[in-house]
């Protein structure tokens, strides 16, 4: 008995550290792939699809292994292979980056480009994710001989494995990039896998199941040369229908994650801390559910759990409609960053925790559901049955459940959410969950009068859910909703204040410009163009309301490519037609819905001038536009004498963050100058102008720009009526910038300083005085 308990504890230790390594890989690999394929919605869905598909294939692959072979040897091989792949993966990602930028076309997403992106994402993720997908079935077979019930085994393993995954997700999101860097975190996970393999080899070095053909089984009086592995038989038609229900359950689970994340992004800060909190809470709920199932399995079947998850999905609609009011009340009392972070965690937990606990209980319940359909081998002689060991059953469950998860990003994220909007998409997912519950209860013959009562309650709840989840009134001056679009990547709104001035908002919280700030936005377009002596080809990174782009396009000799990450923003440009001069119709402008980093890295075009708009510096993924790697790639697509002009929102930067950006920019461009957009202490904006050769103002070329047809009146409207007014905006020379940024760290893909530090500074309210210092 002591030997049995000791072996079980060793395997649970393996389970938790394996989960930690797996989610560390997932978080950091997704970030590495984001650096390559970009942060567009298409790219991220491709990455998620590749990850889930590999996990599904791994589960199916594990069912094909000979059942007489040693699960210990398989586990050793899986962990060792995954560790070696992890250690090699940074080099493989570098190779993938070269292949991607060389062969994937830039521009609008087409079937060909999406196919190429999918294949490249699969090429680097398919092997390690298959290894991950096979680990749980093998671990179940290992522990199954110590527990009398396979479902109890699965519940315990799922608890510890998912708890390790939650810790790994939090650590990889918050700590590893700060102290070890992205590559260092990946190397740590790879080392963990190798240590797990060594640990298994040492602890089970004398275990009879390590060499099953040479030893008798544990606790057996027989002398059979092979270990007996019990199996059951399941009717084929019932197996197919059960796995279909399990796949639909997986589809619903990931659909909820997508939908709840969208709903909460209108309330949270959209930082790496927000995403880490979301993922960790999701996984923590799954872990708690796996542990609770071993105690409640007699009360809740797979069908009952699916029905309850559907009810919780409907309840989440009511919660999401109330959370903005609660948030405003809590924010009035939150005076420190700890309280703000605690508030965000409370918001996430209120929506995620209970349904995720039910989802965690569902995974071992899926295996129990198969048990209700199965019989022992020696009592079933029907040819239309499938024989299955515990490992094969768990492999089927992993395959079906994860295969359903593969479809969710595409069907729900790319199609149903934009078409139906958030509220109706949640109703659809909840209704599908309830149908899965009904069919599962019917299949297992566990339907009774109690569930008719619950069904009636669910119908009443469906009738009572709020009819609108469009969050757009974040500020007191948002008085009228003009347009609202639930896009693939974000919810987008055009709102008016009481003076009928329009503003573009992303996920409710982020202002992307508007008529109030049009004066500065126009100057952001004119100043870089005026400073270039002979620009012909211009690349504009960021479109938003189109005001800055309209100023650039007013210089009619220019040919402009304008890049916008969020496709839905381009479709709302007509909402600002009166102030952006219908720039989307102008012949010298080409609009592209694309990730700016991907376009800069892969385009074959060369430009005289690149103008990078104001980017929200603290948002997850946006810090990549201020990294050394991005600036280096932008430098390569500049023509001789070209200028890269980066506008910086000083009101969103701490003094140290500003020094980091200047140091990073100066590392790439040997000649840097600073320009103010205009003198403003409320929302100050500084422009960094980088060139590869010494820059001097060419007076004759500047005067020529001013004399172009219609330009004098335009420039007068933005207080740039003469070259003297333009040159008065000069702020910092090369020497001053170098002194200011001395000894500052760099912002790189491996050590993303801005994304890690600016959210904390925002919560500490360290931004507000920078413009006055």
Image (cartoon, rainbow, N blue to C red):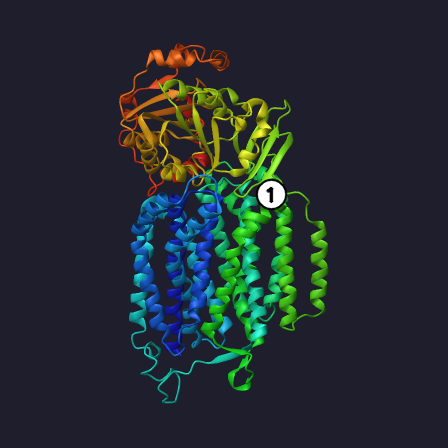
- Residue 588 or residue 74, whichever sits in front: 588
- Residue 362 seen in render: yes
- Residue 704 or residue 374, whichever sits in front: 704
- Residue 506 seen in render: no
Q: Where residue 770 sits: x, y (%)? A: 41, 25
The residue that label 1 is drawn on is: 323
Q: Where residue 305 sits: x, y (%)? A: 60, 63
18 is higher (above) or lower (below) than 40: below
- Residue 32 or residue 658, whichever sits in front: 32
Q: Where residue 637 sits: x, y (%)? A: 34, 33
Q: Where residue 420 sits: x, y (%)? A: 63, 46
- Residue 702 or residue 89, whichever sits in front: 702
Which image quadrant for residue 310? bottom right
For the N terminus, which image quadrant?
bottom left
- Mark 1 lies on a secondary structure that is helix
Which image quadrant for residue 679? top left
For the C terminus, which image quadrant?
top left
Is 152 placed left or right of 178 in the picture? right
> Residue at point 66% right, 65% down?
438
Task: Please give the count of numbered marks on the rendered protein.
Answer: 1
732 is higher (above) or lower (below) than 162: above
Please tell me how crowded label 1 is: few (under 14), some (14-19), or many (20+) other residues with Cα within 10 Å. some
């Amino acid at each position: 008995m002591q030997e049995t308990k000791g072996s079980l504890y060793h395997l649970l230790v393996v389970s938790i550290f394996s989960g930690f390594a797996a989610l560390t890989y997932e978080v950091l690999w997704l970030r590495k792939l984001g650096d390559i394929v970009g942060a567009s919605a298409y790219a991220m869905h491709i990455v998620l699809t590749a990850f889930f598909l590999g996990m599904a294939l791994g589960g199916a692959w594990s069912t094909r292994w000979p059942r007489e072979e040693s699960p210990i040897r398989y586990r050793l091989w899986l962990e060792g292979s995954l560790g070696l792949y992890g250690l090699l993966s940074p080099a493989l990602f570098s190779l993938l980056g070269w292949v991607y930028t060389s062969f994937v076309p830039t521009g609008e997403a087409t079937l060909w480009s999406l196919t190429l992106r999918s294949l490249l994402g699969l090429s680097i993720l398919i092997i390690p994710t298959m290894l991950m997908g096979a680990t749980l079935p093998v671990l179940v077979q290992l522990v199954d001989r110590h527990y009398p019930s396979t479902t109890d085994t699965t519940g315990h393993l799922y608890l510890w494995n998912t708890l390790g995954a939650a810790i790994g997700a939090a650590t990889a999101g918050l700590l590893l990039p700060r102290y070890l860097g992205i590559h260092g975190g990946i190397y740590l996970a790879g080392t963990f896998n190798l240590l797990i393999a060594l640990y298994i080899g040492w602890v089970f070095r004398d275990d009879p199941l390590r060499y099953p053909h040479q030893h008798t089984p544990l606790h057996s009086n027989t002398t059979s040369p092979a270990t007996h592995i019990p199996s059951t038989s399941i009717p084929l038609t019932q197996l197919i229908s059960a796995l279909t229900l399990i796949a639909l359950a997986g589809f619903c689970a990931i659909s909820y994650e997508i939908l709840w994340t969208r709903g909460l992004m209108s309330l949270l800060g959209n930082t790496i801390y927000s995403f880490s909190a979301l993922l960790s809470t999701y996984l923590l709920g799954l872990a708690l559910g796996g542990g609770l199932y071993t105690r409640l399995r007699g009360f809740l079947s797979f069908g009952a759990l699916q029905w309850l998850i559907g009810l919780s999905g409907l309840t989440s609609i009511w919660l999401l409609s109330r959370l903005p009011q609660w948030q405003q009340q809590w924010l009035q009392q939150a005076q420190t960053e700890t309280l703000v972070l605690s508030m965000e965690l409370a918001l996430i937990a209120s929506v995620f925790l209970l349904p995720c606990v039910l989802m965690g209980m569902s995974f071992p319940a899926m295996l129990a559901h198969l048990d209700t359909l199965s019989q022992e081998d020696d009592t079933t002689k029907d040819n239309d049955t499938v024989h299955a060991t515990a490992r094969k059953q768990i492999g089927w469950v992993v395959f079906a459940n994860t295969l359903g998860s593969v479809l969710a990003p595409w069907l729900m994220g790319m199609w149903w959410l934009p078409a139906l909007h958030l509220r109706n998409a949640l109703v659809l997912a909840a209704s599908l969950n309830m149908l899965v519950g009904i069919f599962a209860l019917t299949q297992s013959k566990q339907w009774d009068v109690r569930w008719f009562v619950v069904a009636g309650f669910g119908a009443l709840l469906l009738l009572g859910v709020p009819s609108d989840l469009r969050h757009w009134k974040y500020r007191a001056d948002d008085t009228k909703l003009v347009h609202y679009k639930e896009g693939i990547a974000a919810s987008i709104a055009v709102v008016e204040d009481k003076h009928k001035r329009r503003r573009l908002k992303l996920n409710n919280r982020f202002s992307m410009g508007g008529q109030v700030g049009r004066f500065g936005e126009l100057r952001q377009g004119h100043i870089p163009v005026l400073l270039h002596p002979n620009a012909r080809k211009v690349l504009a990174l960021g479109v938003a309301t189109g005001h800055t782009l309209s100023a650039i396009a007013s210089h009619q000799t220019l040919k402009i490519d304008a890049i916008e990450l969020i496709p839905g923003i381009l479709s709302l440009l007509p909402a600002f037609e009166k102030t952006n001069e219908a720039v989307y119709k102008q012949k010298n402008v080409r609009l592209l819905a694309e990730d700016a980093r991907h376009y800069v890295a892969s385009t074959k075009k060369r430009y005289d001038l690149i103008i990078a708009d104001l980017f929200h510096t603290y948002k997850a993924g946006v810090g990549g536009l201020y990294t050394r790697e991005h600036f280096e790639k932008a430098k390569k697509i500049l023509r001789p004498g070209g200028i890269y002009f980066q506008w910086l929102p000083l009101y969103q930067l701490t003094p140290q963050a500003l020094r980091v950006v200047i140091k990073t920019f100066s590392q790439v461009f040997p000649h840097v100058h600073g320009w103010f957009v205009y003198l403003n202490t409320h929302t100050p904006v500084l422009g960094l102008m980088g060139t590869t050769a010494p820059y001097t103002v060419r007076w004759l070329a500047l005067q020529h720009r001013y004399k172009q047809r219609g330009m004098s009146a335009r420039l007068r409207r933005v207080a740039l009526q003469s070259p003297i007014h333009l040159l008065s905006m000069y702020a910092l020379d090369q020497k001053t910038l170098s002194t200011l940024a001395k000894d500052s760290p760099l912002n790189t893909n491996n050590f993303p300083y801005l994304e890690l530090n600016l959210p904390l500074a925002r919560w500490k309210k360290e931004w507000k005085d920078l413009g006055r210092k």
